[in-house]
Image (cartoon, rainbow, N blue to C red):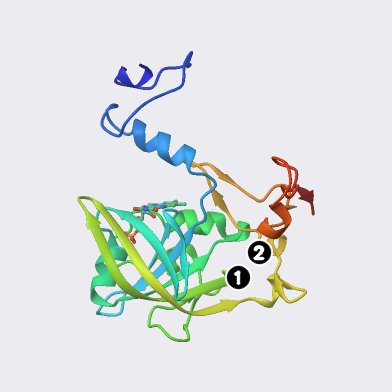
Amino acid sequence: MAGSHDAPLRSLDAPLEVGPDDWKGKDFYHLMTSLVIPRPIGWMSTISASGVRNLAPYSYFNLMGSDPFYLAFGSTSIKDTVTNLREVPEFVANIVSMHVLEEMNFTSGNFPRDEDEYQWAGLTPVPSAKVRPPRVGEARAHLECEMVQIVTDRNTHIVLGRIVHAHVDPSVWKDGRVDPRLLDPVCRLSGSGYASLGELYNVDRPEWKNVQGTQVREAMPRIKKR
Ligand SMILES: Cc1cc2nc3c(=O)[nH]c(=O)nc-3n(C[C@H](O)[C@H](O)[C@H](O)COP(=O)(O)O)c2cc1C
């Protein structure tokens, strides 16, 4: 079986079957982060009890619910973001557009806890509406959150936050909604890889009333290029 090798093979002549403990080092991590793509990035603003700002990107990040609205992100080990959240349980998930990719990446550096990543990256802290950590002025959208829980399993810390406020810059708003092209979100791949949006498509949602009584695949909504 391909998974019985203790490292990835250069090429596969059969499907890869592998578990998290089969390979040594970071190989399974690289497999996971190359399979779950593209990932959005939550550029997390937090603040310490003494008021030191912190900013760091997290791509183990997504919207988790809409009644109420939840998002989650995962920290591998206790980083400054998690330490701050234990002191001040509020954060802002700043949305990362392509024009701030380099700044976002710079803030992932291992800056000491008392260093302010906003200053190092030349970013503007702007007051938030309902939470104490400021948001990134250069970002085009921001989700303010109250932290509800941190779920910890060994070295994985999953932060659950309830969204309490959203800011959207007029520059990304068109015809009553966010235009994905204008938002121009950074998509995280694995390692140092990133992508921007490619082709955009629409596919209607299926409705049972249109499906019942039809043949296999006949009522399947089709891809439409935007
Ligand atoms: C695009 C990007 C996404 C990242 N995503 C995560 C992540 O989801 N979880 C994590 O633990 N670290 C992630 N990192 C690494 C952290 O940003 C990095 O460890 C940072 O120093 C943490 O900062 P903090 O100690 O101020 O919280 C990511 C880095 C980059 C560049």
Instruction: Measure the alpha-carbon separation of dots 2 and 1.
Output: 7 Å
Residue 131, picture quadrant: bottom left
Q: Specify the quadrant that holds the C terminus.
A: bottom right
Question: Residue at 49% across / 42% down in the picture?
Answer: 192
Residue 123 drawn at (x, y percent): 50, 69
Residue 118, picture quadrant: bottom left
In this view, the residue in front, 203 or 103, is 203
Query: Which residue extends farthest left?
Result: 154
Q: Specify the quadrant that holds the N terminus.
A: top left
Q: Residue 140's mark?
A: 1
Residue 207 drawn at (x, y percent): 68, 59
- Tell me the SS state at disc 2: helix
Residue where numbered disc 2 is placed: 183
Residue type (three-letter) at the residue carrying disc 2: Leu
**Badge 2 density bin: few <14, some 14–19, many ≥20, Cα 10 Å:** many
In this view, the residue in front, 60 or 220, is 220
Question: Residue at 39% across / 78% down in the picture?
Answer: 133
Residue type (three-letter) at the residue carrying disc 1: Arg
- Tell me the SS state at disc 1: loop
